[in-house]
Image: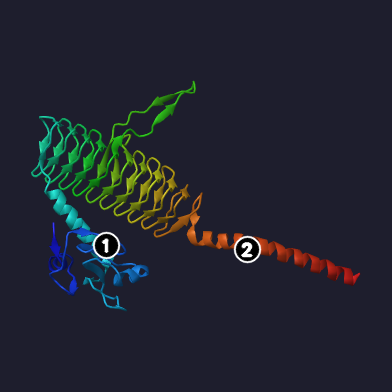
């Protein structure tokens, strides 16, 4: 597909500088882009490439003042990164909307209900009493369990497994290999040292506009629901345990783990490889640094923590400075001790 600068400007509400008939058919990084490609510049450290790139169209910030002549057609917007992300989303939407129909071989139970413009790829298994909304795309090898409900415009990538009774909202994207609704880790210790499995009879609810990365696992609740609330974004390789609640617009980076029954508030940010123990609450707006171990509730909103066990981020920075200064402090203490001994000797 080919788009002109004028067409793209309408999509992202941009001001055109240059040839409005310039056309592109693909995307490229500004330092590598070729003729016929679109690039963007948001980070000032890449500005030098603006004057040498071969890209035909470049999205830039309104505030950028040019230092040299630029050969490409420029599209000026308030925020180039946001505009480029929006453009990619529209492009992806156009591409996926072209997919529809049911490929063979696949299995769809007779009791399953499918909406309009649904695409089901080969080797998908859709179980009994499943409800699938309009414009849903389910890619090869996905499994949809009994009584699962999937809202409109969801994208279920290859190899995703959604267990029985789980609910997926509108505009949800689940990437390849993710498992929704596997059993929570519940085992009761017995007197003889063995463990008895506690049945996990709840489900998982994924609300609207959630995106879940590849190979993430979200366990079903023991009783009730594990809930991923609207707007949350989960990276790849995340473990969400049973009965966890993740608040609206919370973002969690890769390799993080959240133990059972913990509740994260709205707009929480969790860095990569962070671990959060069970049965605690994380206040709205909290920021948990990468590789932190959170062992107790964060009760004050907009608190930043780091370390393991995690504690106040600013206090941690001060501690790090003090630690780096320890060799110098030790030297000064020894000098002071030597001076004190000399003064005492003089008095004698």
Residue 2, quarter of picture: bottom left
Is any part of residue 224 visible from this angle?
A: no
Quarter of the image for the C terminus: give it. bottom right
Q: How far across and how far down the image is residue 192, in percent?
A: 49, 20
Whether pointer 2 and pointer 1 mark residues with C-beta atoms closer than 8 Å, the reply is no
Whole-Å distance between the Cαs marked 2 and 1?
47 Å
Q: Earlier in the sequence, mark 2 or mark 1?
A: 1
User: Which residue is located at x 9 percent, y 44 percent?
Assistant: 117
Residue lying farthest top?
192
Between 172 and 12, the one lying in front of the other is 12
Residue 315 percent coordinates (x, y): 52, 61
Residue, disc 2: 325
Task: Tell me if residue 262 can be seen.
Answer: yes
Mark 1 falls on what kind of element?
Answer: loop
Helix or strand or loop: what does disc 2 sit on?
Answer: loop
Q: Position of residue 150 (x, y in %)?
A: 18, 41
220 vs 344: above or below:
above
Q: Position of residue 116 (x, y in %)?
A: 8, 44
Task: Identify which residue is drawn at 32% across, 69% down.
Answer: 49
Q: Nearer the viewer, residue 347 or 320?
A: 320
Q: Is residue 67 left or right of residue 325?
A: left
**Relative to 294, is 113 on the left or the right?**
left
Q: Residue furthest right?
A: 348
Q: Residue furthest left?
A: 116
Identity of the residue drawn at 86% across and 68% down: 344
**Labelled disc at residue 33:** 1
The quarter of the image holding the N terminus is: bottom left
């Amino acid at each position: 597909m080919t788009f002109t600068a004028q067409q793209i400007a309408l999509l992202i509400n941009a001001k055109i500088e240059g040839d409005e008939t310039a056309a592109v058919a693909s995307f490229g990084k500004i330092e590598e882009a070729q003729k016929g490609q679109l690039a963007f510049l948001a980070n000032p450290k890449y500005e030098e490439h603006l004057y040498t790139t071969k890209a035909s169209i470049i999205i830039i910030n309104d505030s950028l003042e040019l230092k040299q002549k630029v050969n490409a057609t420029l599209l000026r917007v308030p925020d180039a990164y946001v505009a480029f992300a929006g453009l990619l989303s529209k492009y992806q939407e156009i591409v996926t909307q072209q997919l529809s129909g049911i490929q063979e071989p696949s299995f769809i139970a007779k009791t399953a209900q499918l909406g309009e413009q649904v695409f089901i790829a080969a080797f998908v298994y859709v179980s009994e009493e499943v409800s699938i909304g309009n414009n849903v795309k389910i890619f090869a090898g996905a499994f949809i369990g009994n009584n699962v409900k999937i809202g409109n415009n969801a994208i279920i990538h290859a190899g995703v497994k959604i267990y029985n009774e789980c609910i997926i909202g509108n505009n949800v994207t689940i990437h390849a290999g993710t498992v929704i609704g596997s059993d929570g880790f519940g085992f009761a210790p017995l007197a003889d040292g063995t463990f008895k499995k506690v049945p996990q009879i709840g489900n998982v609810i994924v609300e609207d506009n959630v995106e879940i990365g590849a190979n993430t696992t979200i366990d079903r609740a023991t009783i009730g629901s594990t809930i991923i609330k609207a707007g949350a974004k989960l990276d790849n390789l995340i473990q969400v345990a049973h009965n966890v609640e993740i608040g609206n617009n919370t973002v969690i980076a890769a390799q993080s783990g959240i133990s059972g029954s913990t509740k994260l508030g709205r707009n929480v940010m969790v860095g990569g490889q962070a671990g959060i123990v069970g049965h605690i609450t994380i206040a709205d707006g909290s920021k948990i640094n990468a590789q932190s171990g959170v062992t107790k509730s964060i009760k004050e909103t907009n608190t930043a923590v780091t370390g393991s066990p995690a504690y106040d981020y600013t206090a941690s920075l001060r501690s790090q400075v003090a630690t780096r200064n320890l060799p110098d402090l030790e030297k000064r203490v020894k000098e002071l001790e030597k001076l004190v001994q000399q003064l005492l000797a003089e008095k004698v």
